[in-house]
Every structure is written in C-alpha cells, then in structure tokens.
Image: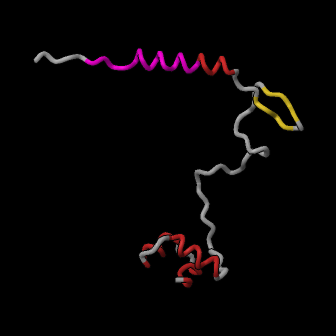
Amino acid sequence: MLDLVKQGYSYRSIALKFECDRSSILYQARKHKIERLVKIVNPKSPKSYPQDGRTFKLKDYYVENNEKINKGKTYAEYVKDEQDRKWKEFINKPTRTRRAG
C-alpha cells in the first residue's frame, strides 16, 4: 500500500483497491512520513487570495483597533426586511382550490 503512495497513486484509488476509507491511507502515509510525488491542485481554486482574506470591499465601516468593522443594519431595518419578506412569501404562495366533488 505504501509503495503505491510512493509511486504517486491517489489516496482514493488506493482506498478503492483495498476497500477502505481514504483517510486510513492518508493516516498511514503520514505515520510513515511518506510524501506524495505529485501535489494535487484544484484548477478551479483561485491562484491567490486577498491579503486580508476578504473577497469584497467594505463600503460602510469604521476602524477600531486597526480593524475595519462593518456597520451593518439596525434592528429596525432587520425587522422591516423580515416583514417585507414574509409579505412577499404570502403573495407568491400558490392558492389552493377545492375540487368539486
């Protein structure tokens, strides 16, 4: 099993061959300090991340202890949004009709 990891086979394919979970293969490889020859990189993952870890710009914020803090909404604004949402759900809800029987 460990030879297959050294040869570069994926943990999933080795796990399918031995009919076990891939985490077991991963555990054994780490236990025996075997590094994979090929690092698997997801082509859909972004190449680089923003330095502060955010993917959007804060529009309305204040700074406290050198940290940007989003102001957000007031409680009244959240209540109004919830009431509007419930009303829209009620309007868009299909009406039930009775069958003549």
Q: Nearer the viewer, residue 83 or 15?
A: 83
Q: Residue furthest left?
A: 101
Q: Nearer the viewer, residue 73 or 42?
A: 73
Q: Quadrant of residue 35?
A: bottom right
Say if the magenta span includes residue 93.
yes
Q: What is the image's colouring? A: secondary structure
Residue 70, horizontal then vertical, whole percent: 76, 30
Residue drawn at 54 percent across, 70 percent down: 23
| Left or right relative to 78: residue 54 | right
Task: Give the left or right position of residue 52, taking residue 84 as reference.
Answer: right
Q: Residue at x 60, y 64 (%)?
A: 40
Residue 21 vs 46, above or below: the answer is below
Please say whether residue 77 is one of the residues in the magenta stretch. no
Residue displayed at 48% across by 71% down = 21
Q: Is residue 39 above or below residue 61?
A: below
Residue extent of the magenta highlight: 81-96
**Image position, residue 32 (x, y; %):** 64, 82
Q: Quadrant of residue 54?
A: top right
Number of labelled discs? 0
Frontmost residue, 50 versus 101: 101
- Residue 26 percent across, percent down from the top left: 57, 73
Dominant SS of magenta comes to helix
Question: Which residue is found at the position 59% from the left and 57% from the top?
Answer: 42
